[in-house]
Image (cartoon, rainbow, N blue to C red):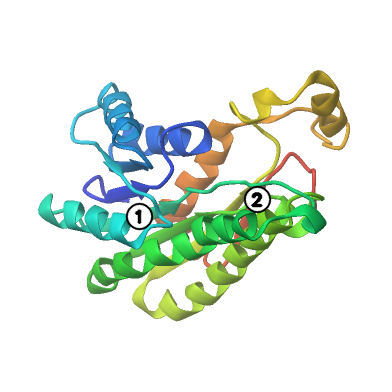
């Protein structure tokens, strides 16, 4: 991939998104990372500037059409056209379905699935004009194995994988690939909040007997964005230590 490509990473302020943004910055790409707040966006820019110059942090709430309009206007003003788009932004609102409130369901679908649609659609213009592009969507191991108490989140991630396969068929003739990466139990600040018993129970289910590292997810994303992955499209790459094989 040429070093002049612009890489957009949504949800880049921490965890997997931060690792992905850093990986592209280290590879010499120009990275635009997003966070839901101006402060978070500034922190992304400051973090990436320690790797190299020219990177940006921008505020974006993918569930808010007005926020997305402002984000796209900022890209246009900066003269930036995305060559690689990594959709990582997402939320959880866990609850058993019988207790789940309408807003817990809707907010997760609005952010994780409808938000992805809203981000991808305007990015396609530049990619189709260039007849080249890479779209990588972050799914989850639970999209295929399910998870009690997360019907909203699992539905959104399963939807992302179906979205990925369908869009891959639409864009293949323009040399634009669309793939997904499905992480499993990854060591981030979110998993750090689990207690020892919860962690031990999860590790017992993982053949590799450890949590994954965010950088390992970033490596998979980087591969899918590379020239070497030009014949890979419509795929979901698992990064789960064998937690789910299928």
Instruction: Left or right? Give the position of 182 relative to 168.
Output: right
**Secondary structure of residue under mark 2:** loop
Image location (x, y in percent) of residue 64: 38, 57
Q: Nearer the viewer, residue 156 or 79?
A: 156
Q: Secondary structure at mark 1?
A: strand
Q: Residue at x 71, y 42 (%)?
A: 240
Q: Position of residue 144 (x, y in %)?
A: 75, 59
Vertical placement of residue 205 versus 118, above or below: above
Q: Indicate whether 162 appears above or below 206.
A: below
On the question of residue 246 being in view, the answer is no
| Residue 151 screen position, x and y as percent | 74, 57
Instruction: Estimate the x, y position of residue 24 in percent, counting from the top left.
Output: 36, 39
Image quadrant in which the C terminus is located: bottom right
Task: Read off the residue under disc 1.
Answer: 84
**Which residue is drawn at the image coordinates 49% and 47% (left, top)?**
221
Instruction: Give the distance between the C-alpha atoms of the residues marked 2 and 1, in whole angstroms.
Output: 20 Å
Dot 2 corresponds to which residue? 140
Q: Depth check: 206 or 96 in front?
A: 96
Q: Quadrant of residue 153 in the image?
A: bottom right
Q: Give the quarter of the image for residue 18.
A: top left
Mark 2, Cα crowd under 10 Å, few <14 / some 14-19 / many 20+, is many
């Amino acid at each position: 991939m040429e070093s002049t490509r612009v890489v957009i990473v949504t949800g880049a302020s921490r965890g997997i998104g931060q690792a992905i943004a850093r990986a592209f910055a280290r590879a010499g790409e120009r990275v635009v990372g997003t966070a839901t707040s101006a402060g978070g966006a500034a922190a992304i820019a400051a973090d990436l500037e320690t790797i190299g110059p020219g990177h940006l942090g921008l505020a974006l709430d993918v569930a808010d059409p007005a926020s997305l309009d402002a984000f796209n206007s900022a890209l246009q003003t900066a003269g930036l056209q995305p060559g690689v788009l990594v959709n990582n932004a997402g939320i959880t609102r866990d609850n058993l379905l019988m207790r789940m409130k309408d807003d817990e369901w809707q907010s997760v679908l609005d952010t994780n699935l409808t938000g992805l649609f809203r981000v991808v659609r305007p990015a396609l213009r530049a990619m189709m004009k260039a007849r080249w592009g890479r779209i990588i969507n972050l799914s989850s191991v639970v999209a295929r194995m399910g998870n009690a108490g997360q019907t909203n989140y699992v539905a959104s991630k399963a939807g992302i994988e179906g979205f990925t396969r369908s869009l891959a068929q639409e864009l293949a003739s323009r040399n634009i690939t669309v793939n997904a990466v499905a992480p499993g139990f990854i060591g981030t600040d979110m998993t750090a909040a689990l207690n020892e018993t919860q962690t031990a129970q999860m590790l017992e289910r993982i053949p590799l007997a450890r949590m994954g590292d965010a950088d390992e997810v970033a490596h998979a994303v980087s591969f899918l964005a590379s020239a070497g992955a030009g014949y890979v499209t419509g795929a979901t790459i698992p990064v789960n230590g064998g937690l789910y094989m299928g």
